[in-house]
Image: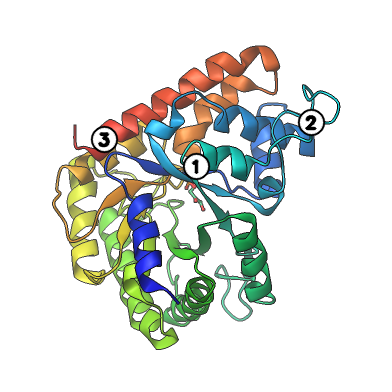
Amino acid sequence: MDIQHLHATALRLLTPSKGILAADESNHTCNARFAAYGIPETEENRRAYRQMLFTTPGIEKYITGVILYDETIRQKTNPMTRTKGDTGMFFREYLIQKGILSGIKVDAGLVDMPGFPGETITQGLDGLPARLEEYKSMGASFAKWRAAFKIGANTPSEEVIRENAKILGRYAKACQDEGLVPIVEPEVLLDGVHSIEKSKMVTTQVLKILFEELPKYFVELPGLILKTSMVISGKDAMVRADAKTVARFTVEVLKTCVPDQIAGVVFLSGGQSPDEATKNFDEIAKLEPLPWPLAFSFSRALQNDALEIWAGKDENIHDAQKAFLGRLQENSLADQGL
Ligand code: 13P
């Protein structure tokens, strides 16, 4: 493992005022988002949609990396407009030409944890080293693995938090051995009626256990990025805390639980509206300097408007790209605490 190389790659991903686009929705998730707008759920539409995002002029000013899905890392730009003999360019090659690094989601999704109703474990360790080797050979620089924790009356349990943390440790070590920067994503879900205090308690427990487990698997912290949810009231809570409180609670939790040595912290949007995610991120960034660089790494909060405008139609590409670029710009300003 070349820890200096990993650290340098992680710092490049965390370049000030830039973020990482999460475009790693599984086919199932991408199809569900298409279905909401009546977009036919085909491989070509998934490809065309990602092409619309990646070819938006100027995105390289606002993002350092894109997290891809297995199908997407194998897809190419523009098969429709290719002339004979032109085999097109892989998205991963297209992005690197723009100075944007490719990452890859390598977990295989959530499954119910037997004996723990309402809780999930993330699968995908089987065959992981071979898959990482292939992604590395394709030019990937980093990877992502997501665990999810739902807040309920008796969940998440310490056992399931720890089991997921151990798996994240094994994943992260395998990535580092392959020269890929692991993004470690333990998401505390927004769904529910819980208070922000409850979110703070659960997020604290999740992050504490995560950073207890990672060193046991020989993970090198300077070559790792944490992707976390913000500490926030449940989506259906009677009273929802404002952005300043979200920022204060989030930073308190991070300072308590996250070792100074990690390369940085990025945030997921988790089903917040685009405006809410950006406002909260902005308030968090106003509390810098912190021991680590921060960045946004949203999927829905960056893509939702663009997807709705695009709606699967070529004639909407220009307007959709404009909306997408607008969201990137807003989050870049937020990153600067402006
Ligand atoms: P959201 O920003 O939509 O939560 O997605 C981020 C992500 O990477 C989910 O795994």
Contact between marks 1 and 2 (CB within 8 A): the answer is no
Q: CA distance from mark 1 to mark 3?
A: 16 Å
Q: To which residue does mark 3 refer?
A: 334
Residue 42 in view (yes/no): no
Report the side of 323 relative to 85 (left or right): left
> Closer to the camera, 11 or 286?
11
C-alpha span from label 1 to label 2: 31 Å
- Expressed as whole percent of the image width and height from the top left, the position of residue 99 reads 46, 40
Q: Is residue 319 left or right of residue 127?
A: left
Q: Residue furthest bottom?
A: 216
Q: Residue furthest front?
A: 85
Residue type, numbered disc 3: Ala
| Label 2 secondary element | loop
Residue 69 in the image, given as x and y percentages of width and height = 63, 51
Which residue in the structure is indicated by mark 2?
86
Nearer to us of marks 3 and 2 is: 2
User: Amino acid type of disc 1?
Assistant: Ser
Front residue of this view, candidates 87 and 132: 87
- Between discs 1 and 2, the one toward the N terminus: 2
* Mark seen at residue 299: 1
Residue 254 versus residue 53 in the image, above or below: below
For the residues carrying marks 1 and 2, which lies nearer the camera in this image? 2
Label 3 residue SS: helix
Please determine whether, in this image, residue 81 is positioned above or below residue 304: above
- For ligand 1, tell me if the residue under mark 1 lies within 8 Å: yes
Q: Position of residue 209 (x, y in %)?
A: 35, 78
Quadrant the N terminus occupies? bottom left
